[in-house]
Amino acid sequence: MLTVRTAPDLRQAIAPWRQAGERIGFVPTMGALHAGHLSLVRLARGHASRVVASVFVNPAQFGPNEDFNRYPRQPEADAAMLETAGCDLLFLPEVATIYPLGHATFVEPAGAAEGLEGACRPGHFRGVATVVCALFNLVRADVAVFGEKDAQQLAVIRQMVRDLHLPIEIVPGPTVREADGLAMSSRNAYLSPEERRAATVLHRALRAAETAISQGERRGDAVRERLREVLNTEPLARVEYAEVVDAETFQPVETLRGRLVLPLAVRIGGTRLIDNIRLTAEER
Ligand code: PAF
């Protein structure tokens, strides 16, 4: 696996693949990789003959009081893991490569970017959409893979690709979980042993809501209440949101129908975790 840091080196590495008519897959990441990211690389391999991954901790998607400075950075370990997972090329840019001096152009998503993460983290999706658009233009892949764990991000990226006519296919990658149900996340590394145990409450809440829906519950408020009921049993948990939204628009639903996402954001001690499940509610 080759590692490149600049746009000209990236172009040079990809050019022969393009000339040979190869299909290129792309997995954008912020590094501190875990099995969830590696599953996205493997998924990309199934959709393309070459896989490019990027590791870039994007300053534009962090708020002023968020964890940009302490976000885990481990480029050597990431490179070794990517190589094992079958990645062909790692793009490891500096901030000045993505945001050249005088950079002043941003992608401002509305619609699916409003509410939930968009409300709790103002400017977050503007930063995500801007960096993803820049990375898409640099890599010019045929297909990109995004994890379903960041469900709203996935909806925002799909919306951006549709609205800006970006010539790329978006493939969702299922959430990978620890044995006790905790969704894999680079931020799990922040949890103390006690917080790590408490963090399983997110998955338990989602399962409880899923059970209620499978038993016929179709009232949005009742499902929200069920989620909070379970989350509130954990003293270390502080709920930011526990919602039921339409899978495409990310708007809250009153009556459950069609493809839905149940997204959660919960602080466990000082660590903010998100998780979700997707389901389809049949009419009753
Ligand atoms: O999901 C992430 O890791 C980031 O938001 C992404 C898509 C790499 C953009 O920085």
Image (cartoon, grey):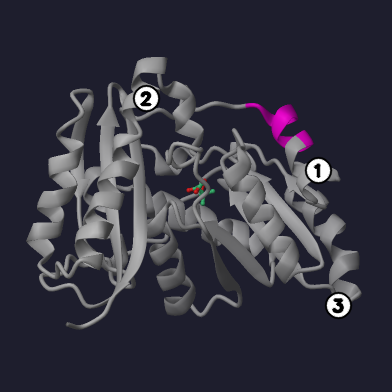
Q: Is residue 280 left or right of residue 99?
A: left
- On the picture, is 68 further left or further right than 18? left
Q: Is mark 3 within 8 Å of ligand 1?
A: no
Q: Are marks 1 and 2 in contact (CB under 8 Å)?
A: no
- Residue for badge 3: 21
Question: x, y percentage for residue 200?
Answer: 35, 34
Residue type of the residue flagged with mark 3: Gly
Mark on residue 197? 2
Residue located at (8% from left, 60% from top): 221
Judge depth for marks 3 and 2 and give the one in front: 2
| Earlier residue among tags 3 and 2 | 3
Work out how far the residue at label 1 is from the one at label 2, CA to CA, in angstroms. Answer: 32 Å
Question: Could you tell me which residue is drawn at 76 percent across and 58 percent down?
Answer: 51
Residue at x-position 68% and y-position 72%: 142
Label 2: few (<14), some (14–19) or many (≥20) C-alpha neighbours in 10 Å: few
Three-letter code for the amino acid on which mark 2 is drawn = Arg
Label drawn at residue 83: 1
User: What kind of element bears circle 2?
Assistant: helix
Residue 116: x, y in percent?
A: 24, 52
User: Quick check: 282 above or below 90?
Assistant: below
Of circles 1 and 3, the one toward us is: 1
Predominant secondary structure, magenta span: helix
Label 3 packing within 10 angstroms: few (<14), some (14-19), many (20+): few
- Label 1 packing within 10 angstroms: few (<14), some (14-19), many (20+): some
Q: Which callout, 1 or 2, points at the residue further toward the start of the chain?
A: 1
- Image coordinates of residue 65 in percent, x first then y, are 31, 27
Highlighted range, magenta: 74-80
Q: Secondary structure at mark 3?
A: loop
Residues 111 and 123: in front is: 111
- Is residue 122 something one can see in this rendering? no
In which quarter of the view is residue 46 placed?
Answer: bottom right
In the picture, the quarter occupied by the N terminus is top right
